[in-house]
Image (tube, rainbow, N blue to C red):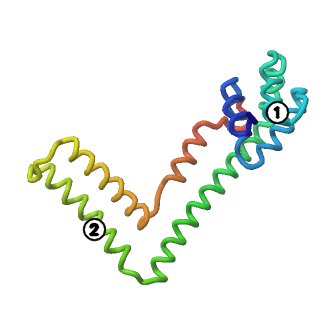
Amino acid sequence: MNMDWKQLGSAVAKLGLPLLGAALPIPGGAAIGTALAQAIGSTSADPQDILTALTANADTQLKAKQFEDTHKETMLKLQLDYQAQIYQQEVADRASARTMQVGTKSYTLPVLAYTIVGSFIAMVGSTLLGYSHVDSVLAGTLVGYLSAKAEQVIAFYFGSSKGSEDKNVLLANSVPVGKQ
């Protein structure tokens, strides 16, 4: 079986090199992998050969750790650029959906949105007030489903904070430059 950069990234992270493992599967990670192969003395830049070299002895893992420390800023920048690119794609997707809605002047989306949110409010209200007498598991499933759909409607009309949440996680897990 041929190993890809994503699989190598997971294996490298398990060896105690999380930053290096996170940088390998993203665009530009193959260049990092090629440089790593050279730094540890791998026979080739193939992901399987790199993993074989890393697991051969502790010296290659030490060299990989030194490589990670030396190129920390580059890998962090690569990850942040990738996250920014993903976020921009999400923003563009939402913007195009909203532009489509404005351009078509269709009543389908607003009617659908009001129906979903209204159904959610009615279902929760009738369940909490005791008007609907259904099995609690079924009621929980229906409320959960309608809740998820109402959340999607709200995200469509008011935006989503997923990109911001991902950025916060990435920043929380990063090491400030100069503090190692």
Horizontal and vertical percent position of residue 21: 70, 34
Q: Amino acid at mark 2?
A: Thr
Residue 178 to residue 134: above or below:
above
Q: Circle 2 is placed at which residue position?
A: 115
Nearer the observer, 160 or 104: 104
**Label 2's element?**
helix
Q: Residue at x 64, y 37 (%)?
A: 174
Residues 64 and 126: in front is 126
Measuring 50% from the left and 52% from the top, which residue is drawn there? 162
Q: Position of residue 77 (x, y in %)?
A: 73, 46
How many residues crowd mark 1 within 10 Å: few (<14), some (14–19), many (20+)? Answer: few
Nearer to the camera, 45 or 27: 45
Structural crowding at the residue carrying mark 2, measured as other residues with C-alpha within 10 Å and reported as few (<14), some (14–19) or many (≥20): few
In the shown orientation, is residue 108 left or right of residue 94?
left
Based on the displayed image, in which of its 4 quarters is residue 178 positioned? top right
Is residue 23 positioned above or below 132 on the image?
above
* Vertical comparison of 86 with 178: above or below: below
Q: Position of residue 40 (x, y in %)?
A: 87, 27
* Residue assigned mark 1: 70
Marks 1/2 in contact by CB < 8 Å: the verdict is no
- Residue occupying the point 22% across, 59% down: 121
Q: Is 100 displayed left or right of 138 in the figure?
A: right
Residue appearing at x 84%, y 17% in the figure: 59
- Secondary element type, mark 1: helix
Query: Looking at numbered disc 1 in the image, what kind of residue is underneath it?
Result: Thr
Q: CA distance from mark 1 to mark 2?
A: 56 Å
